Image (cartoon, grey):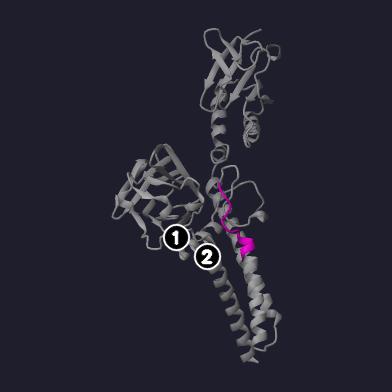
Amino acid sequence: MQFKATKQVMVSTASLICSLAVLVLLGAEMHHPAGQDIKTLSYRISGNHLRSVMGYASAAGDTLKLSALEDGIAVISSGHVRFLASKFPYLTLHQTGLDTRLSVALFWRLRGQEDTVHTEQISHFDDGLLTLHLANNSQWIGEVVEIGLSVQGDLQQPLVIEAISLDPWTTINWVYSIWDQWWAYGGWKGTSINFISGGMYDKVQNIPAPELPMLPVVAIWLGLSISLYVLAIQLLTLKIEWYSVFTMFVLAWVLLDSRWLYELWMRTQVTQNSYSGKNQQQKWQHENDRQWYRMVEEVKQYIPEQSARIFLVLKTRRPLDDYYRYRVRYHLLPHNVFPYRQTLPEQQQMKRGDYILDLGENNDVHYDSEELQLVNTQLKSDALHHIQLNYKSGLGRLYQYQGG
């Protein structure tokens, strides 16, 4: 009896391993880039050969130690390099100190396009190795002349960069890349935890989905394992034990559920780091609309505490514009805000003391400081007279109507 149980365990384990090996070999064969030179060696840039363009960093042995950001940002560059992107579809970042409070992006410049900076968002926040599959980025092509990192956010501990290594295509690198894509954490997106399928995906920010979705791959692995198990049992003239099939199913379920639990744990860490022990004002500084919150706080200095009428104007209609429009309205409460406008209000709608908050870039609106008038150059409507510009920033402009 014990011997039969041991056989069942051996057959089940062999089925799982063999099916995994088959999937890896088939996937590698299908995704192997045509014309890839298998003799290409890795290209490694040690940390002490990197330099800080922004931020406070210094060489520490063979590493670069970033100790502080400059105005909330740090830029680390390789300086001048020269290699063909097509030879190195994988990049491995050797580091310690990278966590969820930081927003990190890889950037590079191409020969003949030195004025253009191409980027790839880094979405995996564990210490140690991080592998990026850059071949999926349409801009990873041509001759690279500079490569580096952009770091933003809250640097609570030093970020130590040991090296940046660029690697040719190999089966091992491909497997590492798929695994990293599955376990990449992309931050809060406003979606339910039950809809996390594995990997960072953001249509708005043009971040592609994982090369191979986790759920279908695990399902195929489970199906192939069960098929191999049944075939092996028949060849060995053994009895099919359903507890073996059930165990395979549980292992696949545990793998998927581990991804779910990892996402939940990461969200919990982000929430704790952002909000734990902070007052309401400090919490607002960590929200997605924090730049709008800061602008509204500055705008409020020019608005009386008692309720004022504010016409909110936002010309553009990009995917998140309406969201930010309503967030600005929320931060302006308890003032009486009219948030639905894409154009300036008409003169007869204005009362003395009313405000116009024009958000974002609006080249259609011209303010004449000498005539104290506001003109929409794209419409034939009359100009607004008796308008005073009280506040101006990159996010918006606050005007006040001083007429009768």
| Left or right, residue 245 beside residue 118 | right
Per the rendering, the mark at residue 169 is: 1
Q: Which residue is mark 2?
A: 29
Q: x, y percentage for residue 391?
A: 53, 20
271 over 221 or under it: above or below:
above
In the picture, which quadrant includes the C terminus?
top right
Q: x, y percentage for residue 251?
A: 62, 71
Q: Secondary structure at mark 2?
A: helix
| Left or right, residue 344 beside residue 128 | right
Nearest to N terminus: mark 1 or mark 2: 2
The answer, for residue 102, to whether it is visible in the render is no
| Left or right, residue 103 beside residue 385 | left
Q: x, y percentage for residue 210?
A: 57, 55
Q: Nearer the viewer, mark 1 or mark 2?
A: 2
6 over 314 or under it: above or below:
below
In the picture, which quadrant includes the N terminus?
bottom right
Q: Given the current orientation, which residue lies at the most extreme front position?
A: 35
Q: x, y percentage for residue 400?
A: 60, 16
Q: Given the current orientation, which residue lies at the most extreme left position?
A: 61
Per the rendering, the mark at residue 354 is: none
Q: What span is colored magenta in the figure?
A: 207-217
- Indicate the amino acid at tag 1: Trp
- Indicate the amino acid at tag 2: Glu
